[in-house]
Image (cartoon, helix red, strand yellow):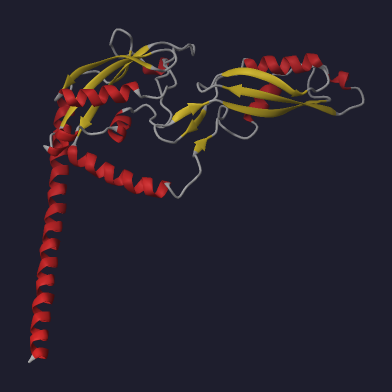
């Protein structure tokens, strides 16, 4: 009798758990379906808002008008966000908690000036769906790392305005937070700080060395019995890609030639600066050391 009762109770428990699991599975399916539906709604809303947008986005002159010909200027560029700052805002934002609870979507369009150091100032909201979105956008603008500033056709730094559309989409935000959480766990296993080193022109090995060598003018007869001599020089590049200092590490033995190398280095075109990809990403200073050879029969005055 006891055995029969045990079997009966076991059957009831197993079937109860099975039914419960099926119930949770149904909820999970409905939840996934609901999330997909929310994503589609948000995508539609975002599309409508973009179509209604009357503001000029991206880089503008200081009067607020788009440059007539973008090919004659260099637009501002951020280390890991390139020319598209919308990605910065959507990937770094913290959604206002009460707006997220209400599933409230919206957007803000922000304008700010960029000085010749590539730093933001004079932040203003052009239009918005809610003031709490504005607070978050303004916070993110103020925390922007410096960019490579706008430059005119002669390569001179210049001030400009920049305008960005920033969408606030609850389900897209939740998706991003979940993806960030997974990425953060993976990052804990890595102790390496990922950087892309600075490079000159096309980035080929020896590009800086070739640039200097091609511009040297010297009298090879001063080498005497030697076929070649070598000097070693450092090139210091700032976070804007500009050479700001050159030094002799090891002289070639002829001061006039050393001085010529230093002058060529100081007049070099801009480099692409080092990029550190951690967090918001930033440009960094860097130092290169390059050997320069002075050979017999290759150069004349």
Instruction: Answer with the quarter of the image where residue 217 lies.
Output: top right
Q: Residue 252, can we see it?
A: yes
Q: Residue at x 67, y 16 (%)?
A: 264
The residue lying furthest to the bottom in this view is 1
Horizontal arrangement in the rendering, residue 249 relative to residue 221 (left or right): left
Image position of 158 with respect to 271: above or below: above
The residue lying furthest to the top in this view is 63
Image position of 232 with respect to 261: above or below: below
Residue 241 pos. (x, y %): 53, 22
Image position of 150 with respect to 231: above or below: above
The residue lying furthest to the right in this view is 225
Q: Residue at x 73, y 18 (%)?
A: 216
Is 172 in front, or is 41?
A: 172
Screen quadrant of the C terminus: top right
Instruction: Answer with the quarter of the image where residue 120 lies.
Output: top left
Is 192 in front, or is 158?
A: 192
Horizontal arrangement in the rendering, residue 15 relative to residue 184 (left or right): left
Q: Residue at x 37, y 26 (%)?
A: 83
Residue 268 pos. (x, y %): 61, 18
Residue 283 pos. (x, y %): 48, 27
Is 146 in front, or is 148?
A: 146
Image position of 153 with respect to 225: above or below: above
Is 4 in front, or is 70?
A: 4
Horizontal arrangement in the rendering, residue 165 relative to residue 119 (left or right): left
Q: Residue 54, can we see it?
A: no
Residue 227 pos. (x, y %): 86, 29
Screen quadrant of the N terminus: bottom left
Q: Residue at x 68, y 14 (%)?
A: 263
Instruction: Answer with the quarter of the image where residue 49 lies.
Output: top left
């Amino acid at each position: 009798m006891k055995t029969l009762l045990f079997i009966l109770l076991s059957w009831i428990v197993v079937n109860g758990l099975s039914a419960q699991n099926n119930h949770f599975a149904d909820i999970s399916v409905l939840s996934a379906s609901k999330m997909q539906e929310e994503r589609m709604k948000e995508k539609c809303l975002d599309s409508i808002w973009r179509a209604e947008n009357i503001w000029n986005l991206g880089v503008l002159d200081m009067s607020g008008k788009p440059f007539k010909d973008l090919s004659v200027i260099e637009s501002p560029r951020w280390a890991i966000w390139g020319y598209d700052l919308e990605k910065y805002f959507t990937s770094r934002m913290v959604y206002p908690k009460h707006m997220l609870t209400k599933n409230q979507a919206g957007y803000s369009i922000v304008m700010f000036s960029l000085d010749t150091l590539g730093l933001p100032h004079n932040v203003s909201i052009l239009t918005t769906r809610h003031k709490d979105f504005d607070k978050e956008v303004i916070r993110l603008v103020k925390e922007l790392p410096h960019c490579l500033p706008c430059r005119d056709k002669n390569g001179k730094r210049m001030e400009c305005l920049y305008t960005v559309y920033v969408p606030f989409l609850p389900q897209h935000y939740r998706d991003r937070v979940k993806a960030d959480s997974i990425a953060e766990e993976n990052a804990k296993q890595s102790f390496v700080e990922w950087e892309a080193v600075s490079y000159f022109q096309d980035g080929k090995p020896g590009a800086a060395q070739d640039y200097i060598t091609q511009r040297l003018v010297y009298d090879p007869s001063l080498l005497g019995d030697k076929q070649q001599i070598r000097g070693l020089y450092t090139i210091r590049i700032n976070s804007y890609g500009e050479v700001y200092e050159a030094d002799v590490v090891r002289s070639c033995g002829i001061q006039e030639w050393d001085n010529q190398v230093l002058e060529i280095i100081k007049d070099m075109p801009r480099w692409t600066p080092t990029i550190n990809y951690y967090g918001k990403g930033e440009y960094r200073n860097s130092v290169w050391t390059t050997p320069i050879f002075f050979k017999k029969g290759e150069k004349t005055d």
